[in-house]
Image: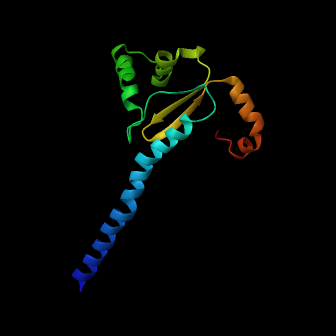
Amino acid sequence: MFDLILSYVWLILTRGFLYVALPYYFYTRVIDVYLSYYHYSNQEYTKLKCVGFPMPILGNFFQTLPILKKLLQNNDQKVPFTKLIEEKFGGSSFEGVILHYVAHKPRLYICDPKFCEGFYVTHNAHYNLTPNL
């Protein structure tokens, strides 16, 4: 009787992993990455620059890795993303929005004061509800 219950529990756990957890993991780590990349890259805002084409699970790791190596070789204390902006986009003179993937999650870095001001003026109620932005 105990073997029957144990095999039934094992069957439920394996089927749950196979039919629920694995497709969810695949969707959030692979498909959702490309859907968000397609969404952000087709925006009307023309100053949007992408660091590079994202890889599933890794994101923009291969674009960030050479910069990390340079920082470690030179014993530089800069933040790696700051060095990435300097090398790819011209440093602090860049104005626009940068799309960077850390692992499978997209990050938007807004470097345009006019865009920030306009966004805050038009979406002020949203900022009041979420103070973490």
Q: Residue at horizontal 54%, vertical 34%?
A: 41
Name the side, left or right, on which 21 lies relative to 115: left
Q: Position of residue 118 (x, y in %)?
A: 74, 31
The number of callouts visible is: 0
Residue 10 vertical position relative to residue 111 in the rendered view, above or below: below
Q: Quadrant of the C terminus?
A: top right
Q: Position of residue 20 (x, y in %)?
A: 40, 63
Q: In the image, residue 87 lies at what x, y percent?
A: 46, 16
| Left-right relation of 99 to 70 | right
Image quadrant in which you'd find residue 96: top right
Give whichever of 66, 131 is nearer the camera.
66
Residue name at image x 40 percent, y 53 percent: 25
Name the residue: 49% across, 44% down.
35
Name of the residue lying farthest toward the left? 3
**Screen quadrant of the N terminus:** bottom left
Is 90 on the left-hand or right-hand side of 61? Answer: right
